[in-house]
Image (cartoon, coloured by chain):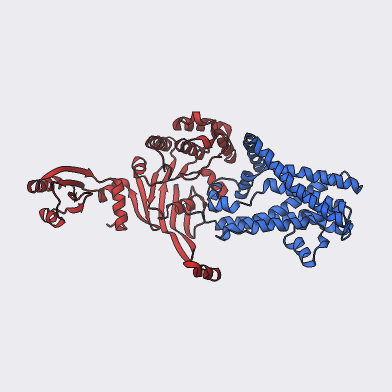
Chain colours: A blue, B red
Protein backbone atom coordinates (compact mmCIF):
# COMPACT_ATOMS: atom_id res chain seq x y z
CA UNK A 1 0.00 0.00 0.00
CA UNK A 2 2.79 2.36 0.95
CA UNK A 3 4.58 1.49 -2.27
CA UNK A 4 1.50 2.26 -4.34
CA UNK A 5 1.12 5.71 -2.80
CA UNK A 6 4.82 6.43 -3.31
CA UNK A 7 4.37 5.32 -6.91
CA UNK A 8 1.60 7.84 -7.52
CA UNK A 9 3.52 10.60 -5.81
CA UNK A 10 6.48 9.99 -8.12
CA UNK A 11 4.20 9.79 -11.12
CA UNK A 12 2.65 13.16 -10.31
CA UNK A 13 6.09 14.75 -10.07
CA UNK A 14 7.07 13.07 -13.29
CA UNK A 15 4.12 14.56 -15.11
CA UNK A 16 4.96 18.03 -13.82
CA UNK A 17 8.53 17.72 -15.04
CA UNK A 18 7.55 16.37 -18.43
CA UNK A 19 4.97 19.03 -19.08
CA UNK A 20 7.72 21.61 -18.79
CA UNK A 21 9.36 20.18 -21.88
CA UNK A 22 6.48 19.71 -24.28
CA UNK A 23 8.43 19.74 -27.53
CA UNK A 24 10.84 17.13 -26.20
CA UNK A 25 7.91 14.90 -25.47
CA UNK A 26 6.58 15.22 -28.98
CA UNK A 27 9.92 14.57 -30.65
CA UNK A 28 10.57 11.55 -28.46
CA UNK A 29 7.25 10.07 -29.36
CA UNK A 30 7.71 10.77 -33.06
CA UNK A 31 11.12 9.11 -33.16
CA UNK A 32 9.76 6.03 -31.37
CA UNK A 33 6.96 5.93 -33.87
CA UNK A 34 9.38 6.14 -36.80
CA UNK A 35 11.48 3.26 -35.48
CA UNK A 36 8.42 1.08 -35.31
CA UNK A 37 7.28 2.11 -38.77
CA UNK A 38 10.63 0.96 -40.16
CA UNK A 39 10.19 -2.45 -38.54
CA UNK A 40 6.73 -2.71 -39.97
CA UNK A 41 7.91 -1.84 -43.48
CA UNK A 42 10.58 -4.53 -43.15
CA UNK A 43 7.94 -7.12 -42.30
CA UNK A 44 5.77 -6.08 -45.22
CA UNK A 45 8.72 -6.22 -47.63
CA UNK A 46 9.59 -9.74 -46.53
CA UNK A 47 6.03 -10.84 -47.16
CA UNK A 48 5.98 -9.10 -50.51
CA UNK A 49 8.17 -12.03 -51.61
CA UNK A 50 6.75 -14.98 -49.68
CA UNK A 51 3.09 -15.31 -48.76
CA UNK A 52 3.82 -17.92 -46.09
CA UNK A 53 6.65 -18.32 -43.60
CA UNK A 54 6.76 -21.79 -42.08
CA UNK A 55 3.02 -21.97 -42.26
CA UNK A 56 2.45 -18.52 -40.80
CA UNK A 57 0.60 -15.97 -42.87
CA UNK A 58 1.54 -12.34 -43.22
CA UNK A 59 -1.35 -11.21 -41.05
CA UNK A 60 -0.52 -13.65 -38.28
CA UNK A 61 3.02 -12.38 -38.14
CA UNK A 62 1.74 -8.83 -38.14
CA UNK A 63 -0.46 -9.72 -35.19
CA UNK A 64 2.51 -11.16 -33.28
CA UNK A 65 4.48 -8.03 -34.00
CA UNK A 66 1.62 -5.85 -32.83
CA UNK A 67 1.24 -7.86 -29.66
CA UNK A 68 4.95 -7.70 -28.93
CA UNK A 69 4.85 -3.89 -29.00
CA UNK A 70 2.50 -3.77 -26.01
CA UNK A 71 4.60 -5.55 -23.33
CA UNK A 72 7.63 -3.89 -24.85
CA UNK A 73 6.04 -0.47 -24.30
CA UNK A 74 5.22 -1.35 -20.69
CA UNK A 75 8.79 -2.50 -20.17
CA UNK A 76 10.17 0.65 -21.78
CA UNK A 77 8.02 2.87 -19.58
CA UNK A 78 9.12 1.41 -16.26
CA UNK A 79 12.44 -0.34 -16.62
CA UNK A 80 14.92 2.11 -18.04
CA UNK A 81 18.01 0.39 -16.81
CA UNK A 82 20.21 0.71 -19.85
CA UNK A 83 22.35 3.45 -18.27
CA UNK A 84 22.22 2.05 -14.75
CA UNK A 85 25.96 1.41 -14.59
CA UNK A 86 26.87 4.87 -15.82
CA UNK A 87 24.39 6.81 -13.75
CA UNK A 88 24.10 4.91 -10.53
CA UNK A 89 27.39 3.07 -10.12
CA UNK A 90 29.99 5.26 -11.83
CA UNK A 91 28.44 8.57 -10.80
CA UNK A 92 27.57 7.19 -7.39
CA UNK A 93 23.86 8.02 -7.41
CA UNK A 94 23.34 4.64 -5.78
CA UNK A 95 24.64 6.11 -2.51
CA UNK A 96 21.71 8.47 -2.38
CA UNK A 97 19.23 5.77 -3.27
CA UNK A 98 20.52 3.57 -0.47
CA UNK A 99 19.94 6.24 2.16
CA UNK A 100 16.19 6.25 1.57
CA UNK A 101 13.66 3.95 3.19
CA UNK A 102 12.25 2.41 0.02
CA UNK A 103 13.58 -0.64 -1.81
CA UNK A 104 16.46 0.52 -3.99
CA UNK A 105 15.23 -1.08 -7.22
CA UNK A 106 11.78 0.38 -6.75
CA UNK A 107 13.26 3.84 -6.30
CA UNK A 108 15.35 3.52 -9.45
CA UNK A 109 12.37 2.34 -11.45
CA UNK A 110 10.41 5.36 -10.25
CA UNK A 111 13.22 7.77 -10.90
CA UNK A 112 13.83 6.49 -14.39
CA UNK A 113 10.31 5.83 -15.58
CA UNK A 114 9.31 7.23 -18.93
CA UNK A 115 5.58 7.05 -19.11
CA UNK A 116 5.46 8.39 -22.64
CA UNK A 117 6.85 5.04 -23.80
CA UNK A 118 3.42 3.66 -23.04
CA UNK A 119 2.24 5.48 -26.14
CA UNK A 120 4.27 2.91 -28.08
CA UNK A 121 1.50 0.44 -27.26
CA UNK A 122 -0.94 2.37 -29.45
CA UNK A 123 0.62 1.38 -32.81
CA UNK A 124 0.78 -2.15 -31.44
CA UNK A 125 -2.93 -2.13 -30.70
CA UNK A 126 -3.72 -0.69 -34.12
CA UNK A 127 -1.63 -3.35 -35.88
CA UNK A 128 -3.33 -6.07 -33.84
CA UNK A 129 -6.76 -4.67 -34.65
CA UNK A 130 -5.92 -4.53 -38.34
CA UNK A 131 -4.55 -8.07 -38.36
CA UNK A 132 -7.47 -9.51 -36.40
CA UNK A 133 -9.98 -7.99 -38.82
CA UNK A 134 -8.10 -9.50 -41.76
CA UNK A 135 -7.88 -12.85 -39.99
CA UNK A 136 -11.49 -12.50 -38.81
CA UNK A 137 -10.48 -13.47 -35.26
CA UNK A 138 -13.16 -13.67 -32.61
CA UNK A 139 -12.62 -12.74 -28.99
CA UNK A 140 -14.43 -13.57 -25.76
CA UNK A 141 -15.05 -11.18 -22.91
CA UNK A 142 -12.37 -12.86 -20.77
CA UNK A 143 -9.77 -12.48 -23.50
CA UNK A 144 -9.31 -8.92 -22.39
CA UNK A 145 -8.12 -10.05 -18.95
CA UNK A 146 -5.96 -12.76 -20.44
CA UNK A 147 -4.45 -10.14 -22.68
CA UNK A 148 -3.58 -7.94 -19.67
CA UNK A 149 -2.11 -10.93 -17.83
CA UNK A 150 0.03 -11.98 -20.80
CA UNK A 151 1.23 -8.43 -21.38
CA UNK A 152 2.28 -8.06 -17.74
CA UNK A 153 3.96 -11.48 -17.89
CA UNK A 154 5.87 -10.44 -21.01
CA UNK A 155 6.93 -7.11 -19.52
CA UNK A 156 8.17 -8.93 -16.41
CA UNK A 157 10.28 -11.29 -18.50
CA UNK A 158 11.91 -8.32 -20.17
CA UNK A 159 12.33 -6.60 -16.83
CA UNK A 160 13.78 -9.72 -15.22
CA UNK A 161 16.39 -10.14 -17.91
CA UNK A 162 17.43 -6.50 -17.98
CA UNK A 163 17.50 -6.14 -14.21
CA UNK A 164 19.71 -9.21 -14.03
CA UNK A 165 22.01 -7.65 -16.60
CA UNK A 166 22.12 -4.40 -14.67
CA UNK A 167 23.23 -6.26 -11.53
CA UNK A 168 26.43 -7.23 -13.33
CA UNK A 169 27.55 -3.67 -12.53
CA UNK A 170 27.58 -4.57 -8.83
CA UNK A 171 29.91 -7.48 -9.34
CA UNK A 172 32.25 -6.35 -12.10
CA UNK A 173 34.09 -3.08 -12.40
CA UNK A 174 34.25 -3.05 -16.14
CA UNK A 175 31.49 -1.66 -18.25
CA UNK A 176 29.83 -4.20 -20.45
CA UNK A 177 28.32 -3.75 -23.84
CA UNK A 178 25.95 -6.61 -23.22
CA UNK A 179 22.86 -4.41 -22.98
CA UNK A 180 22.66 -3.33 -26.65
CA UNK A 181 23.34 -6.91 -27.71
CA UNK A 182 20.45 -8.08 -25.57
CA UNK A 183 18.14 -5.54 -27.16
CA UNK A 184 18.97 -7.11 -30.51
CA UNK A 185 18.37 -10.63 -29.28
CA UNK A 186 15.09 -9.57 -27.75
CA UNK A 187 13.67 -8.71 -31.16
CA UNK A 188 13.85 -12.38 -32.16
CA UNK A 189 10.87 -13.00 -29.93
CA UNK A 190 8.51 -11.19 -32.24
CA UNK A 191 8.80 -13.70 -35.07
CA UNK A 192 7.31 -17.20 -35.14
CA UNK A 193 9.55 -19.38 -33.05
CA UNK A 194 9.56 -22.37 -35.41
CA UNK A 195 11.37 -20.51 -38.17
CA UNK A 196 14.53 -20.74 -36.07
CA UNK A 197 17.01 -23.54 -35.53
CA UNK A 198 16.36 -25.89 -32.60
CA UNK A 199 19.12 -24.42 -30.47
CA UNK A 200 17.92 -20.85 -30.89
CA UNK A 201 14.38 -21.96 -30.18
CA UNK A 202 15.55 -23.56 -26.95
CA UNK A 203 17.45 -20.45 -25.90
CA UNK A 204 14.53 -18.15 -26.66
CA UNK A 205 12.25 -20.33 -24.58
CA UNK A 206 14.29 -21.28 -21.54
CA UNK A 207 17.44 -19.17 -21.28
CA UNK A 208 16.49 -15.75 -22.58
CA UNK A 209 12.75 -16.35 -22.86
CA UNK A 210 11.97 -13.55 -25.28
CA UNK A 211 9.62 -15.87 -27.16
CA UNK A 212 7.25 -15.43 -24.21
CA UNK A 213 7.00 -11.74 -24.98
CA UNK A 214 5.84 -12.11 -28.57
CA UNK A 215 5.07 -15.32 -30.34
CA UNK A 216 3.88 -17.58 -27.49
CA UNK A 217 1.26 -15.33 -25.91
CA UNK A 218 0.14 -14.01 -29.31
CA UNK A 219 -0.55 -17.54 -30.53
CA UNK A 220 -3.30 -17.83 -27.92
CA UNK A 221 -5.24 -15.10 -29.68
CA UNK A 222 -4.39 -16.60 -33.07
CA UNK A 223 -6.01 -19.88 -31.92
CA UNK A 224 -2.79 -21.81 -32.53
CA UNK A 225 -3.63 -24.59 -30.12
CA UNK A 226 -0.27 -26.31 -30.40
CA UNK A 227 1.29 -23.35 -28.55
CA UNK A 228 -1.34 -22.92 -25.85
CA UNK A 229 0.80 -24.54 -23.14
CA UNK A 230 3.54 -22.05 -23.79
CA UNK A 231 1.11 -19.16 -24.01
CA UNK A 232 -0.27 -19.83 -20.53
CA UNK A 233 3.19 -20.25 -19.06
CA UNK A 234 3.95 -16.62 -19.89
CA UNK A 235 2.94 -15.16 -16.49
CA UNK A 236 4.72 -18.00 -14.67
CA UNK A 237 7.94 -17.48 -16.58
CA UNK A 238 7.58 -13.73 -16.03
CA UNK A 239 7.18 -14.12 -12.28
CA UNK A 240 10.07 -16.57 -12.12
CA UNK A 241 12.52 -14.43 -14.06
CA UNK A 242 11.49 -11.34 -12.15
CA UNK A 243 11.96 -13.10 -8.81
CA UNK A 244 15.41 -14.31 -9.84
CA UNK A 245 16.29 -10.77 -10.90
CA UNK A 246 15.23 -9.34 -7.52
CA UNK A 247 17.34 -11.94 -5.72
CA UNK A 248 20.35 -11.10 -7.86
CA UNK A 249 19.74 -7.42 -7.27
CA UNK A 250 19.60 -7.80 -3.50
CA UNK A 251 22.79 -9.85 -3.56
CA UNK A 252 24.35 -7.14 -5.73
CA UNK A 253 23.41 -4.34 -3.34
CA UNK A 254 25.24 -6.18 -0.57
CA UNK A 255 28.30 -6.18 -2.78
CA UNK A 256 27.96 -2.53 -3.73
CA UNK A 257 31.25 -0.73 -3.16
CA UNK A 258 30.46 2.82 -4.06
CA UNK A 259 32.69 5.34 -5.76
CA UNK A 260 35.92 6.76 -4.46
CA UNK A 261 34.77 10.08 -3.08
CA UNK B 1 21.71 4.53 24.59
CA UNK B 2 24.60 5.46 22.37
CA UNK B 3 23.84 6.87 18.95
CA UNK B 4 26.76 5.08 17.33
CA UNK B 5 28.75 2.08 18.50
CA UNK B 6 31.55 0.82 16.33
CA UNK B 7 33.89 -2.00 17.21
CA UNK B 8 36.88 -3.25 15.24
CA UNK B 9 35.29 -2.03 12.04
CA UNK B 10 37.12 -2.98 8.88
CA UNK B 11 36.51 -2.47 5.19
CA UNK B 12 38.71 -3.98 2.53
CA UNK B 13 38.49 -3.35 -1.18
CA UNK B 14 39.93 -5.62 -3.79
CA UNK B 15 41.56 -3.40 -6.34
CA UNK B 16 42.58 -4.57 -9.75
CA UNK B 17 46.21 -3.68 -10.38
CA UNK B 18 46.77 -2.93 -14.03
CA UNK B 19 50.15 -3.47 -15.60
CA UNK B 20 51.71 -0.69 -17.58
CA UNK B 21 51.92 -0.48 -21.35
CA UNK B 22 50.17 -2.28 -24.15
CA UNK B 23 51.80 -5.62 -23.36
CA UNK B 24 50.70 -5.18 -19.79
CA UNK B 25 47.15 -4.53 -20.91
CA UNK B 26 47.15 -7.79 -22.87
CA UNK B 27 48.49 -9.71 -19.92
CA UNK B 28 45.74 -8.18 -17.77
CA UNK B 29 43.24 -9.79 -20.09
CA UNK B 30 44.42 -13.23 -19.01
CA UNK B 31 45.55 -12.96 -15.46
CA UNK B 32 44.49 -10.17 -13.24
CA UNK B 33 46.44 -9.18 -10.21
CA UNK B 34 44.47 -7.95 -7.27
CA UNK B 35 45.59 -5.97 -4.31
CA UNK B 36 43.64 -5.72 -1.09
CA UNK B 37 43.34 -2.19 0.19
CA UNK B 38 42.23 -1.58 3.73
CA UNK B 39 40.21 1.61 3.56
CA UNK B 40 39.12 1.31 7.18
CA UNK B 41 41.38 -0.72 9.40
CA UNK B 42 39.93 -1.83 12.70
CA UNK B 43 38.42 1.30 14.20
CA UNK B 44 36.36 1.46 17.39
CA UNK B 45 34.48 4.38 18.87
CA UNK B 46 31.15 5.36 20.35
CA UNK B 47 29.15 8.52 19.97
CA UNK B 48 26.66 9.49 22.65
CA UNK B 49 23.29 10.96 21.86
CA UNK B 50 23.38 14.71 21.39
CA UNK B 51 27.10 14.85 20.67
CA UNK B 52 28.55 16.78 17.76
CA UNK B 53 31.60 14.96 16.50
CA UNK B 54 34.06 16.08 13.85
CA UNK B 55 35.43 13.23 11.80
CA UNK B 56 38.56 14.42 10.11
CA UNK B 57 41.32 13.04 7.97
CA UNK B 58 43.12 13.62 4.73
CA UNK B 59 41.73 12.52 1.38
CA UNK B 60 41.70 8.76 1.27
CA UNK B 61 42.02 8.37 5.04
CA UNK B 62 38.77 6.41 5.13
CA UNK B 63 36.29 9.05 6.27
CA UNK B 64 33.76 8.57 3.51
CA UNK B 65 34.05 4.81 3.69
CA UNK B 66 33.25 4.93 7.41
CA UNK B 67 30.28 7.22 6.84
CA UNK B 68 29.00 4.92 4.12
CA UNK B 69 29.19 1.95 6.45
CA UNK B 70 27.48 3.87 9.24
CA UNK B 71 24.66 4.87 6.91
CA UNK B 72 24.15 1.36 5.57
CA UNK B 73 25.38 2.06 2.05
CA UNK B 74 28.38 -0.24 2.30
CA UNK B 75 28.64 -3.60 3.99
CA UNK B 76 31.63 -3.85 6.34
CA UNK B 77 34.24 -6.55 5.77
CA UNK B 78 34.28 -7.27 9.49
CA UNK B 79 33.48 -5.66 12.80
CA UNK B 80 30.36 -4.54 14.59
CA UNK B 81 28.27 -1.44 13.94
CA UNK B 82 25.22 -0.45 15.93
CA UNK B 83 23.65 2.85 14.94
CA UNK B 84 20.46 3.99 16.63
CA UNK B 85 20.26 0.47 18.07
CA UNK B 86 20.21 -1.15 14.65
CA UNK B 87 22.59 -2.86 12.27
CA UNK B 88 22.61 -0.38 9.33
CA UNK B 89 22.90 -2.71 6.36
CA UNK B 90 20.78 -5.51 7.83
CA UNK B 91 17.63 -3.49 8.41
CA UNK B 92 18.43 -0.82 5.88
CA UNK B 93 14.97 0.43 5.04
CA UNK B 94 13.87 0.68 8.67
CA UNK B 95 17.21 2.07 9.73
CA UNK B 96 17.51 4.94 7.24
CA UNK B 97 14.28 6.44 8.55
CA UNK B 98 16.17 7.27 11.74
CA UNK B 99 19.06 9.09 10.10
CA UNK B 100 19.59 12.09 7.88
CA UNK B 101 22.43 12.19 5.37
CA UNK B 102 23.93 15.08 3.45
CA UNK B 103 26.67 14.47 0.93
CA UNK B 104 28.16 17.83 0.05
CA UNK B 105 29.07 16.68 -3.41
CA UNK B 106 25.82 14.95 -4.26
CA UNK B 107 22.28 16.20 -4.46
CA UNK B 108 19.31 14.70 -2.65
CA UNK B 109 16.90 16.92 -4.52
CA UNK B 110 15.32 16.43 -7.89
CA UNK B 111 16.98 18.65 -10.42
CA UNK B 112 13.98 19.70 -12.47
CA UNK B 113 11.25 20.22 -9.94
CA UNK B 114 10.72 22.96 -7.38
CA UNK B 115 12.34 22.56 -3.98
CA UNK B 116 9.03 22.15 -2.20
CA UNK B 117 8.02 19.40 -4.62
CA UNK B 118 11.18 17.53 -3.70
CA UNK B 119 10.29 18.01 -0.05
CA UNK B 120 6.81 16.69 -0.66
CA UNK B 121 8.18 13.61 -2.38
CA UNK B 122 10.61 12.96 0.47
CA UNK B 123 7.86 13.51 3.00
CA UNK B 124 5.99 10.70 1.31
CA UNK B 125 9.05 8.47 1.11
CA UNK B 126 9.76 8.94 4.81
CA UNK B 127 6.07 8.64 5.72
CA UNK B 128 6.01 11.86 7.72
CA UNK B 129 2.53 12.80 9.00
CA UNK B 130 1.20 16.14 7.70
CA UNK B 131 0.94 17.70 11.11
CA UNK B 132 4.49 16.79 12.14
CA UNK B 133 5.82 17.94 8.78
CA UNK B 134 4.11 21.31 8.99
CA UNK B 135 5.35 22.00 12.51
CA UNK B 136 8.92 20.80 12.11
CA UNK B 137 9.62 21.98 8.58
CA UNK B 138 8.31 25.49 9.08
CA UNK B 139 10.95 25.86 11.79
CA UNK B 140 13.69 24.39 9.65
CA UNK B 141 12.75 26.58 6.70
CA UNK B 142 12.77 29.65 8.88
CA UNK B 143 16.11 28.84 10.50
CA UNK B 144 17.77 28.19 7.15
CA UNK B 145 16.08 31.19 5.52
CA UNK B 146 15.01 29.23 2.48
CA UNK B 147 11.37 30.32 2.38
CA UNK B 148 11.77 32.37 -0.83
CA UNK B 149 13.56 29.49 -2.59
CA UNK B 150 10.87 26.88 -2.17
CA UNK B 151 9.09 27.39 -5.47
CA UNK B 152 12.24 27.53 -7.60
CA UNK B 153 13.58 24.49 -9.42
CA UNK B 154 16.81 23.16 -7.93
CA UNK B 155 18.79 23.73 -11.11
CA UNK B 156 18.26 27.48 -10.75
CA UNK B 157 19.70 27.71 -7.23
CA UNK B 158 23.21 28.82 -6.36
CA UNK B 159 25.43 26.33 -4.54
CA UNK B 160 24.85 28.03 -1.20
CA UNK B 161 21.11 28.09 -1.68
CA UNK B 162 21.09 24.49 -2.80
CA UNK B 163 23.15 23.35 0.14
CA UNK B 164 20.73 24.90 2.62
CA UNK B 165 17.86 23.18 0.83
CA UNK B 166 19.79 19.90 0.96
CA UNK B 167 20.10 20.26 4.70
CA UNK B 168 16.39 20.88 5.05
CA UNK B 169 15.68 17.87 2.84
CA UNK B 170 17.79 15.65 5.07
CA UNK B 171 15.77 16.76 8.07
CA UNK B 172 12.26 16.21 6.76
CA UNK B 173 11.72 13.24 9.05
CA UNK B 174 13.42 14.97 11.99
CA UNK B 175 16.05 12.27 12.44
CA UNK B 176 17.84 11.96 15.79
CA UNK B 177 21.14 11.43 13.99
CA UNK B 178 22.58 13.46 11.15
CA UNK B 179 25.57 12.57 8.94
CA UNK B 180 27.20 15.39 7.06
CA UNK B 181 29.91 14.59 4.55
CA UNK B 182 31.69 17.80 3.56
CA UNK B 183 28.62 20.00 4.03
CA UNK B 184 30.44 23.29 3.55
CA UNK B 185 32.61 22.39 0.58
CA UNK B 186 32.85 25.28 -1.87
CA UNK B 187 30.58 27.60 0.09
CA UNK B 188 31.26 31.22 0.86
CA UNK B 189 31.81 32.46 4.41
CA UNK B 190 28.31 33.82 4.97
CA UNK B 191 26.61 30.60 3.97
CA UNK B 192 29.06 28.63 6.09
CA UNK B 193 28.19 30.76 9.09
CA UNK B 194 24.50 30.34 8.45
CA UNK B 195 24.85 26.57 8.22
CA UNK B 196 26.95 26.34 11.38
CA UNK B 197 24.48 28.49 13.25
CA UNK B 198 21.67 26.26 12.07
CA UNK B 199 23.43 23.03 13.08
CA UNK B 200 24.04 24.43 16.54
CA UNK B 201 20.40 25.39 16.94
CA UNK B 202 19.32 21.98 15.69
CA UNK B 203 21.56 20.28 18.21
CA UNK B 204 20.32 22.42 21.10
CA UNK B 205 16.67 22.28 20.18
CA UNK B 206 16.18 18.66 19.20
CA UNK B 207 19.28 17.08 20.71
CA UNK B 208 20.25 15.89 17.23
CA UNK B 209 23.48 13.93 17.18
CA UNK B 210 25.74 15.14 14.40
CA UNK B 211 28.71 13.43 12.81
CA UNK B 212 30.46 15.64 10.34
CA UNK B 213 33.44 15.28 8.05
CA UNK B 214 35.10 18.35 6.69
CA UNK B 215 38.33 19.75 5.42
CA UNK B 216 37.55 23.11 6.91
CA UNK B 217 38.91 23.13 10.45
CA UNK B 218 36.91 26.24 11.27
CA UNK B 219 33.74 24.14 10.92
CA UNK B 220 35.07 21.80 13.56
CA UNK B 221 36.16 24.62 15.84
CA UNK B 222 32.76 26.26 15.58
CA UNK B 223 30.73 23.11 16.13
CA UNK B 224 32.48 20.13 17.64
CA UNK B 225 33.76 19.54 21.10
CA UNK B 226 35.08 16.19 20.08
CA UNK B 227 37.15 15.16 17.11
CA UNK B 228 38.06 11.78 15.75
CA UNK B 229 41.08 11.88 13.53
CA UNK B 230 41.75 9.24 10.95
CA UNK B 231 44.89 8.35 9.07
CA UNK B 232 45.29 5.45 6.65
CA UNK B 233 42.16 3.82 7.96
CA UNK B 234 43.12 3.98 11.63
CA UNK B 235 42.02 6.33 14.37
CA UNK B 236 45.00 8.39 15.47
CA UNK B 237 43.19 10.70 17.83
CA UNK B 238 39.84 10.58 19.58
CA UNK B 239 39.14 13.21 22.19
CA UNK B 240 38.21 16.77 22.84
CA UNK B 241 39.34 19.54 20.58
CA UNK B 242 40.59 21.41 23.67
CA UNK B 243 42.92 18.60 24.65
CA UNK B 244 44.23 18.33 21.14
CA UNK B 245 45.07 22.01 21.20
CA UNK B 246 46.68 21.80 24.61
CA UNK B 247 48.80 18.86 23.73
CA UNK B 248 49.82 20.01 20.31
CA UNK B 249 49.13 23.66 20.12
CA UNK B 250 51.13 24.75 23.11
CA UNK B 251 53.40 27.65 22.59
CA UNK B 252 53.47 30.23 19.89
CA UNK B 253 55.14 31.00 16.66
CA UNK B 254 57.26 34.11 16.46
CA UNK B 255 58.19 35.34 13.01
CA UNK B 256 61.28 37.55 12.90
CA UNK B 257 62.03 39.64 9.85
CA UNK B 258 65.74 40.41 10.00
CA UNK B 259 67.49 43.27 8.27
CA UNK B 260 69.62 40.70 6.46
CA UNK B 261 69.68 36.95 5.82
CA UNK B 262 70.60 34.67 8.72
CA UNK B 263 71.85 31.15 9.24
CA UNK B 264 69.98 28.47 11.20
CA UNK B 265 72.99 27.51 13.27
CA UNK B 266 73.59 31.04 14.52
CA UNK B 267 70.00 31.37 15.66
CA UNK B 268 70.00 28.00 17.35
CA UNK B 269 73.11 28.93 19.24
CA UNK B 270 71.47 32.15 20.30
CA UNK B 271 68.48 30.43 21.85
CA UNK B 272 70.38 27.44 23.26
CA UNK B 273 68.66 25.97 26.31
CA UNK B 274 65.25 27.42 25.49
CA UNK B 275 63.65 24.52 23.55
CA UNK B 276 63.08 26.63 20.48
CA UNK B 277 62.75 25.20 16.97
CA UNK B 278 63.68 27.50 14.11
CA UNK B 279 62.15 27.18 10.69
CA UNK B 280 62.88 29.13 7.60
CA UNK B 281 60.20 31.59 6.55
CA UNK B 282 59.01 32.54 3.12
CA UNK B 283 61.81 35.01 2.49
CA UNK B 284 65.49 34.51 3.12
CA UNK B 285 65.52 37.05 5.93
CA UNK B 286 62.44 35.64 7.69
CA UNK B 287 62.81 33.00 10.40
CA UNK B 288 60.05 31.51 12.47
CA UNK B 289 60.68 30.34 16.02
CA UNK B 290 58.36 27.75 17.59
CA UNK B 291 58.48 28.73 21.22
CA UNK B 292 56.92 26.87 24.17
CA UNK B 293 54.38 28.91 26.10
CA UNK B 294 55.92 31.45 28.42
CA UNK B 295 59.17 31.56 26.52
CA UNK B 296 58.27 34.31 24.10
CA UNK B 297 59.68 37.36 25.99
CA UNK B 298 63.04 35.68 26.56
CA UNK B 299 63.42 34.68 22.91
CA UNK B 300 62.38 38.07 21.61
CA UNK B 301 64.74 39.92 23.93
CA UNK B 302 67.69 37.68 23.06
CA UNK B 303 67.16 38.07 19.32
CA UNK B 304 66.41 41.75 19.44
CA UNK B 305 69.47 42.46 21.56
CA UNK B 306 71.74 40.84 19.01
CA UNK B 307 70.39 41.58 15.55
CA UNK B 308 68.72 44.39 13.69
CA UNK B 309 65.03 43.55 13.10
CA UNK B 310 62.50 44.93 10.67
CA UNK B 311 59.44 43.24 12.15
CA UNK B 312 58.22 40.77 14.76
CA UNK B 313 54.90 38.91 14.55
CA UNK B 314 53.51 36.51 17.12
CA UNK B 315 50.95 33.84 16.13
CA UNK B 316 48.85 31.39 18.07
CA UNK B 317 49.07 27.93 16.58
CA UNK B 318 45.80 27.29 14.73
CA UNK B 319 43.90 24.03 14.78
CA UNK B 320 44.62 23.69 11.12
CA UNK B 321 48.35 23.73 11.81
CA UNK B 322 48.02 21.29 14.68
CA UNK B 323 46.28 18.87 12.40
CA UNK B 324 48.86 19.38 9.69
CA UNK B 325 51.65 18.79 12.17
CA UNK B 326 50.05 15.60 13.38
CA UNK B 327 49.73 14.30 9.86
CA UNK B 328 53.31 15.17 9.06
CA UNK B 329 54.46 13.10 11.99
CA UNK B 330 51.99 10.34 11.29
CA UNK B 331 50.55 9.74 14.76
CA UNK B 332 49.80 11.34 18.07
CA UNK B 333 52.42 10.52 20.64
CA UNK B 334 51.86 10.47 24.36
Image coords of residue B261 (percent x, y): 15, 51
Image coords of residue B103 (percent x, y): 47, 45
Q: In the image as oriented, which residue stretches furthest toward the top?
A: B148
Q: Residue at x 56, y 60 (%)?
A: A174
Image coords of residue A189 (percent x, y): 77, 56
Q: Residue at x 26, y 51 (%)?
A: B248
Relative placement, left or right, of B68 versus B298 is right
Relative placement, left or right, of A229 versus A28 is right
Residue A192 visible within the image:
yes
Find residue B143 and report its image quarter.
Answer: top left
* Closer to the camera in the image, A56 or A97: A56
* Closer to the camera in the image, B229 or B300: B300
Find residue A56 and report its image quarter.
Answer: bottom right
Residue B128 visible within the image:
no
Image coords of residue B189 (percent x, y): 37, 37
Q: Residue at x 45, y 62 (%)?
A: B37
Relative placement, left or right, of A131 versus B110 is right
Amino acid sequence: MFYISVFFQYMAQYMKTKLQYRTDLLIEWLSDFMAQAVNLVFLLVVFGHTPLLHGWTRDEILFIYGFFLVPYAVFGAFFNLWDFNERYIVQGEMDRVLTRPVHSLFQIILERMELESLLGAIPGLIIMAYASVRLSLTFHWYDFFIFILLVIGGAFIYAGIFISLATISFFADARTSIMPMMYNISSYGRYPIDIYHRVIRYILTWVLPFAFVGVYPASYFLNKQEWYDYAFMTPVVGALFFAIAIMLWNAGVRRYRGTGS
Amino acid sequence: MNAIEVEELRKEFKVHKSRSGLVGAFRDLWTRRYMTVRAVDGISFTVKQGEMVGYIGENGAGKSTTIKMLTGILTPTSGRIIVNGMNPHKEREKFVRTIGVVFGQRSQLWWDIAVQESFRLLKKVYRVPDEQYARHMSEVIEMLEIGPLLDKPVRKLSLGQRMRCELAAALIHNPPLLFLDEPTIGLDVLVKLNIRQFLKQLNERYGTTILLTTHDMSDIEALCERVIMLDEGKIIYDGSLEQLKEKWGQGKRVAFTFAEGKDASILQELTAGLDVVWKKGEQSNVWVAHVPSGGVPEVVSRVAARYALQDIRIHEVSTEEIVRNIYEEGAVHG
